Image: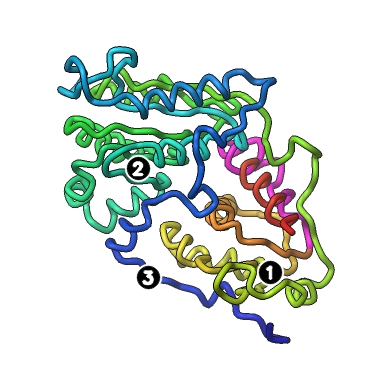
Amino acid sequence: MPDAPFPHLVDRDPSVTPEQMAAALVPPPQFESASFDSYRPDPDFPSQAAVRDTVAAFVASAPTGRRGLFGRRRAPEVAATSGVYLDGGFGVGKTHLLAAAYHAASGRKTFGTFIEYTALVGALGFRGTVDLLRGTALVCIDEFELDDPGDTMMMTRLIKELADDGTRFAATSNTPPGALGEGRFAAQDFLREIQAMSDRFDTMRIDGLDFRRRSTDESAATVDDVAAVLQTLPSGARPGGPGNVTQDDFRAVVGHLASVHPSRYVAMVEGLDAVGLTDVAPFTDQTDALRWVALVDRLYDGQVRIVASGTPLDQVYPATMLDGGYRKKYLRAASRVVALTRAS
């Protein structure tokens, strides 16, 4: 490990081709072995086990038997649906179940965040994306966004076109609860948008506590000297290669995010073991805060450790932001940075 300086995250400005975007439509590494059996429902919240079983039955329903919706065959014991939509708070295992559905499904399948699919449309055009995904048996959409009406309409149109051709869907919700109810997906709003596609899109609520904080209510860890801690991290943290870390001023990273499309954040953090952030301070601009949330999601997907000084990273959202329409996003990001700053 070099003494100093460390490489900088702000020097990473990756370009991503449409082919790379399409190839990346798989579950993130931490969910590469997720299964319905490995999901551990909280016994205090029966909806978790119930939703797990329902999603497993949805995936297992073979297209045999009598003809169902869109001409697809349905298993007689499982009602035919175009898709299942998992609604719930953060940390209840929605992404785990989505990845489990992906791994259990037969045939061609894709897994990506809402942002990744909309970025694909931006790169290939709507018709090009339809042609690329046509024939896919299952499309998994994580963190379905409802705060951008244009993207929402585009995605529901994509869903309709693919469903008309036999594709089925599994998705998780990410709704601004300040406008639509704390931790709740606006089921009727969504169903109204996709009514032309199907009236059999099942929305299921998962209740529960954030699994990352079931044991103790911790805050994000901070350090006095980021560089000193980065020096102590073991090399070779990832199998088959040396450790790879960066160090930047927090505000410089936030500024850099404005110049990189969120669809490229995953490439920006690819291969990193840890990121060091100095002088973390609360946000004053909501756009900056939302870009940071998108980066946190990609850091969490890659299980990239965060070493930070200054304000704890779960305390960077002022009350005015937490009381607004993006509260759920901020709380999810806060939960994730607690886990990433406390990773061993």
Tell which tag, 2 or 3, sits nearer the viewer. Answer: 3
Which of disc 1 and disc 2 is earlier in sequence?
A: 2
Q: Residue 130: x percent and y percent?
A: 20, 45
Query: Do tag 2 and tag 3 residues touch (Cβ < 8 Å)?
Result: no
Give the CA separation, mark 1 to mark 3.
Answer: 23 Å
Q: Residue 281: x percent and y percent?
A: 73, 60
| Other-residue count near label 2 (Cα within 10 Å), few / some / many at <14 / 14–19 / ≥20 | some
Give the CA separation, mark 2 to mark 3.
Answer: 22 Å
Q: Is residue 281 left or right of residue 273?
A: right
Which of disc 3 and disc 2 is earlier in sequence?
A: 3
The quadrant in which the N terminus is found is bottom right
Residue 314: in magenta span: yes
Residue 129: in magenta span: no
* Magenta residue span: 310-330
Q: Residue 167: x percent and y percent?
A: 24, 34
Give the CA separation, mark 2 to mark 1.
Answer: 33 Å
Per the image, label 3 sits on a secondary structure element best described as loop
User: Which residue shows up at 50% across the image and 63% down it?
Assistant: 258
Q: Residue 124: x percent and y percent?
A: 23, 56
Q: Dot 2 corresponds to which residue?
A: 151
The quadrant in which the C terminus is found is bottom right
Q: Dot 3 corresponds to which residue?
A: 15
Q: Dot 1 corresponds to which residue?
A: 276
